[in-house]
Image (cartoon, rainbow, N blue to C red):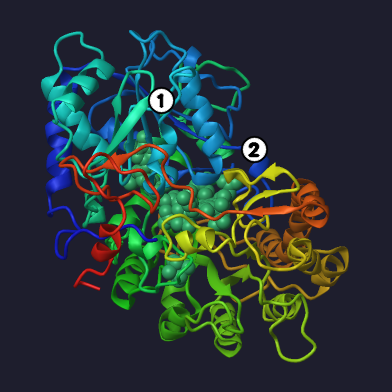
């Protein structure tokens, strides 16, 4: 079941509204000396192909966005802590500026849920009168906010509020709280007072509990958020990087954040929001509904400015666009890439040096073929493509074998590396003797067509997608295997956790076999001679053109040779990297393979809905509730969601 959509025409914040909130909050911040900590939940047992390295060497954009917003609003005493780098961090021991923070925030994906809960539980060990206000946000609570509220009075722990959308909702809430805060009052006390007086009910995008302080008895869901329409209104992303805690083994926080000139040692890649939204409607994907079918983008000039700022402040050269489908709309793609290309033509050093990658669909690549030269000029170096299953047996979105191979050829001819994202599923065989339906057939074709890296995941239930509820109610999703409960950290696409296959261990084996087929010593040796990474512009000079300030130095022969070698050997280096990542993958998934092989499978019959009753502030159905959620008195949580999804705007 997808997230409901707001009524037609009311999906976006009014132009200028976010800028106004930021201004108003700055005035309040000046009178409130708050300290705040934002933690990113991360479970290290989830580290494996194809995300290994990107998962820890790229400071996530979510916590950075929250940090940037807090700094921009005037809350300078803010720190970002990543469990990726600070495994031993204990919220109960954190001090910032010598005191327990006023607000403790957590950002979590679904698969890091256990770490998220553990941090909330640990924060709840702080004396109740000193305990910070606990706020949770990010992709986990966007779809399943109830999981951060405790229900057992014997084991009291709970977040105070879940933000089920973008970070400006937090600013909205802080404004309400600070306007009513008495001198010296704790943020948690003011939150409880405001909540109980109904002052938060008009802020869409919050879920909070009612009940005793020890356990949630009922959840109030203020509804589906409005989205920030003009992404140029977002705060400067440079701010978030200035408050990141350095990697450490300590439970406590350091007295200062990572200095600016050291950031790129820890985070060699920067993810950046460029555009949001996708016009396709793949039934296993929550993205179009989350975006309420809106397509949003930053302007080209703004993106050029952000790249430049991040390069100059932190020496970051490699970027990953947090796009759902960068080529979704031709006009906006050209606005962005032409603006970047103009900077390069003008000899701007940062823009000439940077390289970036992002995601798009095969269909849109083919549509954009005549523009690929300018897109490459803008610095686009790699494109992750949703190839899924080229036979179209899973989903049809213009990614037939012919289209995919055509898109690969066009991209490579224009100097852009295509990276296929494949989705294995029950009806796909490992190998087919006729046609190209088999997983290995497709992996082989894509490699031949020039893929130097790949992503192969198993189709897995994704909260907020059209198929989500049915996957559980139909018994496709596993509850336990061989007595081992399926917990969120293995609902990652790397483990088979939903399948009708008679021998699901074979599906698990197929994933490994496909990776081994792609990354192996023989291919490594071949790639040393016949490199797939040596494409046009791969060894091109990145120093600015003659107009650039630092362009005087001529390109020496040794520099030319080193660039050519790098372009040629990248393929072999990625093969080595893939084999190394494969060791992690085998180690993490092998036991699961054995459990699938020998044990009984218990299947879900119900979707994992909230056990806590939910309702809207006026007593109506809760927008985020799944079927089966207990309704509060006089409330039915069942029908309305589907009605709203079919809005007349669709
Ligand atoms: C980049 C990315 C990655 C990178 C992350 C690298 C990194 N360290 O940043 C990599 C490639 C490693 C990755 C891997 C995976 N990813 Co990923 N990824 C994305 C992607 C495309 C962009 C994330 C991003 O930067 N967004 C931009 C930021 C600004 O948005 P945001 O994080 O949502 O934060 C906003 C709000 O949520 C909110 N917010 C966030 N935190 C908080 C906290 C508080 C207190 C508050 C108030 C607000 C708040 O404010 C922010 C600004 O508005 C998203 C899709 C998307 N477009 O968001 C998927 C996404 C996050 N990934 C997803 C998944 C499932 C995965 C994988 C499991 C693989 C898979 N099966 O698809 C793996 C997990 C790997 C691991 N071990 O962690 C899902 C998560 C679903 C869920 N319910 O948790 C997403 C949402 C895609 C989807 N299916 O919808 N991913
Ligand atoms: S094309 Fe990608 S982002 Fe768009 S709906 Fe399909 S899976 Fe989701």
513 relative position to 226: left or right:
right
As rendered, which of 409 and 556 lies closer to the eye? 409
As rendered, which of 522 and 278 lies closer to the eye? 278
Q: Is the CB atom of the residue marked by disc 1 within 8 angstroms of ligand 1's nearest atom? A: no
Residue linked to disc 1: 158
As rendered, which of 341 and 506 lies closer to the eye? 506
Residue 570's tag is none
Which residue appears at 50% of the width and 19% of the height? 122
| Residue 273, quarter of the rendered image | bottom left
Which residue appears at 47% of the width and 85% of the height? 366
State which quarter of the image contains the C terminus: bottom left
Residue at the limit of the structure toward the front, as seen here = 634
Residue linked to disc 2: 44
Q: CA distance from mark 2 to mark 1?
A: 23 Å
N-terminal of the pair, mark 2 or mark 1, is 2
Residue 51, position as x, y percentages in the image: 62, 52
Residue count near mark 2 (Cα–Cα under 10 Å), binned few <14, some 14–19, many ≥20:
some
Residue count near mark 1 (Cα–Cα under 10 Å), binned few <14, some 14–19, many ≥20:
many
136 relative position to 331: left or right:
right
Seen in the picture, residue 88 relative to 545 is either above or below; the reply is above
Residue 286, position as x, y percentages in the image: 42, 61
| Residue 423, quarter of the rendered image | bottom right
Seen in the picture, residue 270 relative to 179 is either above or below; the reply is below
Which residue appears at 43% of the width and 45% of the height? 61
As rendered, which of 547 and 183 lies closer to the eye? 183
């Amino acid at each position: 079941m997808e997230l409901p959509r707001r009524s037609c025409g009311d999906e976006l914040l009014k132009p200028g509204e976010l800028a106004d909130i930021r201004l108003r909050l700055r005035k309040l911040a000046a009178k409130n000396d708050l300290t705040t900590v934002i933690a990113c939940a991360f479970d290290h047992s989830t580290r494996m192909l194809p995300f290994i390295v990107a998962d820890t060497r790229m400071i996530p954009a979510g916590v950075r966005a929250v940090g940037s917003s807090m700094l921009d609003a005037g809350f300078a005493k803010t720190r970002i802590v990543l469990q990726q780098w600070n495994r031993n961090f204990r919220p109960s021991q954190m001090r910032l500026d010598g005191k327990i923070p006023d607000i403790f925030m957590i950002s979590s994906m679904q698969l890091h849920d256990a770490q998220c809960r553990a941090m909330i539980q640990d924060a709840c060990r702080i004396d109740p009168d000193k305990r910070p206000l606990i706020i949770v946000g990010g992709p986990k609570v966007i779809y399943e906010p109830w999981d951060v509220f405790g229900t057992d009075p014997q084991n009291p722990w709970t977040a105070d509020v879940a933000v089920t959308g973008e970070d400006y909702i937090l600013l909205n809430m802080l404004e309400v709280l600070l306007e009513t805060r008495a001198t010296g009052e704790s943020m948690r006390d003011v939150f409880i007072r405001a909540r109980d007086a109904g002052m938060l009910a008009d802020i869409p995008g919050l879920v909070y509990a009612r009940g005793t302080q020890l356990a949630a008895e009922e959840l109030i869901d203020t509804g589906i958020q409005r989205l920030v329409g003009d992404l140029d209104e977002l705060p400067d992303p440079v701010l978030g990087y200035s408050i990141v805690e350095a990697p450490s083994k300590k439970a406590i926080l350091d007295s200062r954040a990572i200095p600016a000139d050291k950031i790129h040692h820890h985070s060699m890649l920067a993810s950046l929001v460029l555009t949001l939204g996708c016009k396709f409607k793949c039934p296993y994907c929550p993205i179009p509904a989350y975006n309420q079918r809106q397509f949003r983008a930053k302007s080209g000039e703004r993106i050029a400015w952000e790249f430049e700022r991040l390069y100059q402040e932190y020496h970051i050269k490699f970027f990953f666009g947090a796009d759902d489908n960068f080529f979704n709309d031709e006009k906006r793609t050209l606005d962005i890439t032409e603006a970047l290309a103009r900077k390069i033509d003008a000899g701007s050093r940062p823009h000439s040096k940077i390289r970036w990658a992002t995601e798009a669909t095969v269909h849109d690549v083919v549509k954009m073929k005549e523009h690929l030269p300018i897109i490459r000029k803008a610095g686009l170096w790699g494109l992750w493509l949703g190839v899924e299953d080229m036979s179209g047996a899973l989903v049809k979105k213009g990614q037939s074998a012919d289209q995919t191979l055509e898109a690969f050829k066009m991209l490579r001819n224009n100097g852009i590396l295509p990276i296929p994202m494949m989705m294995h599923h029950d009806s796909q065989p490992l190998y087919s003797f006729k046609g190209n339906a088999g997983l290995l057939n497709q992996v082989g074709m894509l490699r031949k067509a020039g893929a130097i890296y790949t992503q192969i995941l198993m189709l897995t239930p994704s909260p907020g997608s059209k198929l989500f509820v049915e996957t559980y109610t139909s018994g496709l999703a596993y509850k336990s295997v061989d007595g081992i409960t399926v917990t969120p950290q293995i609902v990652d696409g790397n483990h088979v956790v939903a399948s009708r296959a008679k021998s699901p261990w074979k599906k698990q084996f197929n994933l490994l076999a496909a990776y081994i087929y792609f990354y192996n010593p023989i291919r490594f040796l071949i790639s040393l001679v016949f490199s797939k990474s040596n494409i046009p512009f791969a060894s091109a000079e990145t120093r600015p053109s003659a107009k650039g300030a630092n362009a005087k130095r001529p390109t020496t022969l040794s520099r030319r040779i080193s660039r050519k070698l790098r372009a040629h050997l990248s393929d072999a280096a990625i093969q080595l990297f893939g084999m190394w990542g494969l060791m992690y993958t085998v180690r993490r998934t092998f036991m699961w393979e054995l459990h699938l092989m020998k044990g009984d499978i218990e299947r879900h019959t119900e979707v994992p809905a909230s056990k806590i009753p939910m309702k809207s502030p006026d007593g109506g159905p809760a927008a985020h509730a799944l079927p089966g959620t207990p309704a509060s008195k006089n409330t039915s949580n069942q029908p309305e969601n589907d009605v709203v999804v079919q809005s007349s705007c669709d």
